[in-house]
Amino acid sequence: MKPDGLDWTPPPRTKDEPQPPAQLRRILALFRPYAARLASVGLLVAASAVVSVATPFLLRAVLDTAIPQGRTGLLSLLVLGMIAAAVVNSIFNVLQTLISTTVGQHVMHDLRTAVYSHLQRMSLAFFTRTRTGEVQSRIANDIGGMQSTVTSTATSLVSNLTSVIATVVAMVALDWRLTIVSLLLLPLFVWISRRVGNERKRITGERQKQLALMSSAVQESLSVSGVLLGRTMGRSDSLSTDFTEQSHRLARLEVQSSMAGRWRMSTIGIVMAAMPAVIYWAAGLASASGAPIVSIGTLVAFVSLQQGLFRPTVSLLSTGVDVQTSLALFHRIFEYLDLPVEIQEPEHPVRIDRIRGDVSFENVEFRYHPEQPRPTLTGIDLTVPAGTSLAVVGETGSGKTTLSYLVPRLYDVTGGRVAIDGTDVREVSFETLAETIGVVSQETYLFHASVADNLRFAKPDATDAELVAAAEAAQIHHMIAALPEGYDTVVGERGYRFSGGEKQRLAIARTILRNPPVLILDEATSALDNQTERAVQQAIDALAVGRTTITIAHRLSTVRRADQIAVLDGGRVAELGTHEQLLALGGRYAALLRREQPTAAQPGTATGPAGARTVGARTVSGRRVNGQAVNGTVVSGQAAIGRSL
């Protein structure tokens, strides 16, 4: 099993997994909405088969009647009939190809949109353990690989099957004895084709996995971040070598797929091609013995039908091989469609029309995996009244970001509940949650599109004036306006044409445009230099006015003015209070501040009896949230360490 964060591996097949017959029924269900069009294709195919088998009968009349008897009028009619049959057959073939291709492309469209829409509903957990290239490969390579099967196989199957049946009936009508001789080896041919199909199905599954690996490698190593990392680490040559090896493995699999069963199928072709010669030989021997079994016209017509039987029979066998091969592709697509949606919209969602913005965590517990021995969060009780701010601080891995993910339902709690205005977020519609909660994270994501398009992702119908107002509030308008193309400037992949601070302010402008009553700031300034941080912080302060704000803080200098500060430790709320109260408590928050500002607490600070910290003239007692009493110190209501912030 691969560790989380590297890849997602489908579970192994079990005896309860749908087997090929069930899979075939599921594939056929994809064509059900287009039954009427397929029925018209069937009629065209049947008509084409009837017209095709009529030609040998016309030929027999030409050879046995019209030419020997010198009936030129009949000969002309028979020849015109043969030409008309060819013309009509061609028209029918064009029409059936048009209809079948249209149906096939609709089925491809349905599959693509079904997979994409299903993945859009998957939880964040799925994408944290699945490589982006793997997802792209399922949609592009797997569905793309089914195109010929979906667009032409159904028509080819019906067409060839109808032609075979019509031809066999015509052959029996001409001479049943020669027909039996011609069909003796057919069961062997069917068995061989099934063996070849199973072999190609196995190889196709391996080939698609290799395509997914290559897609992931390209997506990761040829992105802007991947190229930067490869060059700065001196790994460009090794990445090229790795890709060359993967491409070589894919080439080998492609050759194996193309050659699998090729000799066996060629043997079938040789035998089928030799059958007319065998028929001529048998007829010649019978004639030499003085007992001809058929007339010359019948013999030529029969051989013509037999040659006509050869093409659809071989095609039918090949189609069977293609169907078995495509089952591997359908299986990979159905794997994604069958993935359970972990976070689903409630059956009767609540839509809150007037959001105040009260947020509460009520005895919240969360585990990433059911078998996780220790919960990531446990016993979280926090209340953030509307319009107030909560800062969440703590050591790395204490659960800060996880806590923020629970509010917009990027994950669902495994115990307790998270509520907005008293309503459990699991009962609220996704649309309401999206309108209510805005998130600005440390890693800003921008699409490879214009600045205006990136901003309008939050509000597609936003006017140019609204874009400018949002950008001004985020203190980024003047920079955008100074660009040669202004708001039409393309930001580049992931916004790499802009600095970190500029991208953050674009993200803030995007959130301002959406105007959510609840705002989550997930370490939005932790990766910025001090000067850029101040500019971004001013934009954040403007954004936070009048909103319920939850800030995940890395730099504690950004949380001093928060109405509440919660200190997480080991997934629990260890301390809760204002900046001054927590300083007076002298616990974990004060320790975090000392670590961030190691010299700030030195002036005027001493250690009192029993380990109590004394600053100035007064020592007071505080209390941690977990109930453990501690001694803290304040001087004139302000700890010395706080003055440095």
Image: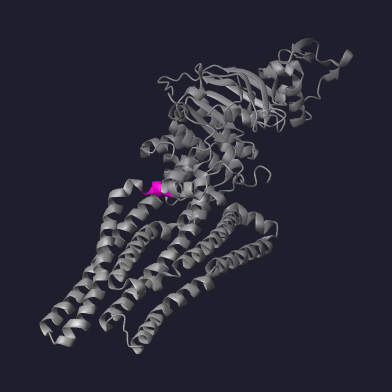
Side (left or right) of 232 relative to 72: right
Outermost residue, right direction?
A: 609
Side (left or right) of 514 relative to 123: left
Side (left or right) of 68 relative to 265: left
Tell me the quarter of the image containing the C terminus.
top right
Q: Nearer the viewer, residue 487 or 573?
A: 573
SS assignment for the magenta stretch, majority: helix
Q: Nearer the viewer, residue 57 or 51?
A: 57
Outermost residue, bottom direction?
A: 288
Side (left or right) of 109 relative to 56: right
Identified at 71% across, 13% down, the residue is 637
x, y percent for residue 456: 41, 40
Identified at 77% across, 18% down, the residue is 586
x, y percent for residue 252: 60, 67
Q: Would you identify the image quadrant in which residue 308 lies?
A: bottom left
Identified at 36% across, 71% down, the residue is 179
The magenta stretch is: 27-31
Residue 446 covered by magenta stretch: no
Is residue 491 at all visible to an observer of this figure?
no
x, y percent for residue 471: 46, 37
Q: Nearer the viewer, residue 239 or 197?
A: 197
Tell me the quarter of the image containing the N terminus.
top right
**Relative to 627, does residue 257 appear above or below in the rendering?**
below
Outermost residue, left direction?
A: 73
Q: Nearer the viewer, residue 334 or 22?
A: 22
